[in-house]
């Protein structure tokens, strides 16, 4: 299991095995291709790259891809997976997304930020520094596709959990369950508690806790994102409710914004 420093909240989460990545990438590929086709330069930033699945996917499409993540453990796992893959290699950078303007050089032709990464920027100052820093690294006309959960729906309905993710375990008959709990705070923040459990039917106890931790998040609503994006020099082109391109509505599962560096 991947382990990181004590302050690395994602050091014990094996995202590579908890998500059906081939199916997810096939599902998202048409929208990614549509948005990134307008990239003036075939160099793309993957913000919040995790273990690098989207980074390597973009690299396989012929883009020069650079992944950035705040978790040392996730970056290490991304580099290890990249070393074992065929073809051109991606670049990975460890660092806080609020400091993106200091982490990578200018001249990128596009960026993505997928998988509910932005809520880890928990205050407006950090969000604005991320958007302004990113704008300084992108060439004019560069597209930026960002995706997070639709917190307009989640906060208005008081939703507390995500759907369970259940994947095969290493032992025969064993399953790994990924549980994600959200606890809203009075100031608009969220306590996110991801937990990984091992399910072994027929044994006692049948469920074993592998890891659990609390992570501070901010559930950004659509209106709270579009203002800072425009202030940083982005134009909002289109909003979707899914990564398959369905229109955004208040009850959509996700908020997906296609913006362009002016």
Image (tube, rainbow, N blue to C red):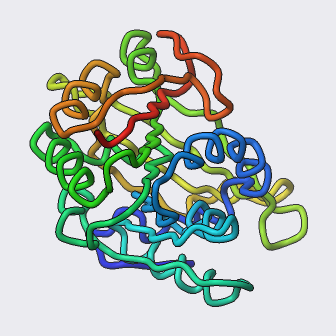
- The structure residue drawn at horizontal position 25% and vertical position 50%, both measured from the top left corner, is 135
Q: Residue furthest right?
A: 172
Q: Quick one: quadrant of the C terminus?
A: top left
The vertical placement of 50 against 29, above or below, is below
Side of 236 where 167 appears, left or right: right
**Of residues 127 and 112, the one drawn nearer to the viewer in this rendering:** 112
**What is the x, y in percent for residue 87?**
71, 84
Location of residue 154 by image quarter: top left
7 sits left or right of 18 in the view: left
Q: Quadrant of the N terminus?
A: bottom right
Viewer-side residue, 15 vs 12 = 15
Name the residue at 37% across, 66% down: 69
Residue 119 is situated, as x and y percent measured from the top left of the image, at 32, 41
Tell me: residue 19, above or below residue 128: below
Q: Position of residue 8 (x, y in %)?
A: 32, 69
The number of callouts visible is: 0
Residue 219 falls in image quadrant: top left
Q: Position of residue 242 (x, y in %)?
A: 61, 28
């Amino acid at each position: 299991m991947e382990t990181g420093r004590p302050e690395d909240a994602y050091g014990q989460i094996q995202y590579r095995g908890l998500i059906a990545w081939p199916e997810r990438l096939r599902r998202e590929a048409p929208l990614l291709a549509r948005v990134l086709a307008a990239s003036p330069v075939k160099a793309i930033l993957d913000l919040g790259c995790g273990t690098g699945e989207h980074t390597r996917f973009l690299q396989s499409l012929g883009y020069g891809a650079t992944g950035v993540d705040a978790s040392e453990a996730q970056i290490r796992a991304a580099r290890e997976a990249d070393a074992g893959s065929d073809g051109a290699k991606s670049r990975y950078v460890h660092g806080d997304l609020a400091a993106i303007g200091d982490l990578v050089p200018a001249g990128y032709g596009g960026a993505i930020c997928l998988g509910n990464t932005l809520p880890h920027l928990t205050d407006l100052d950090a969000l604005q520094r991320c958007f302004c820093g990113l704008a300084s690294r992108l060439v004019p006309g560069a597209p930026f596709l960002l995706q997070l959960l639709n917190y307009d729906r989640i906060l208005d309905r008081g939703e507390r959990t995500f759907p369970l993710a259940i994947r095969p375990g290493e032992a025969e008959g064993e399953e790994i369950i990924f549980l994600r709990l959200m606890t809203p705070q009075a100031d608009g923040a969220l306590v996110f508690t991801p937990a990984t459990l091992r399910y072994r039917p027929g044994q006692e106890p049948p469920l074993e806790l592998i890891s659990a931790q609390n992570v501070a998040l901010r559930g950004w609503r659509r209106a709270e994102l579009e203002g800072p994006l425009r202030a940083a020099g982005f134009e909002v082109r289109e909003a979707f409710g899914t990564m398959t391109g369905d229109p955004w509505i208040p009850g959509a599962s996700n908020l997906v914004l296609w913006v362009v560096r002016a």
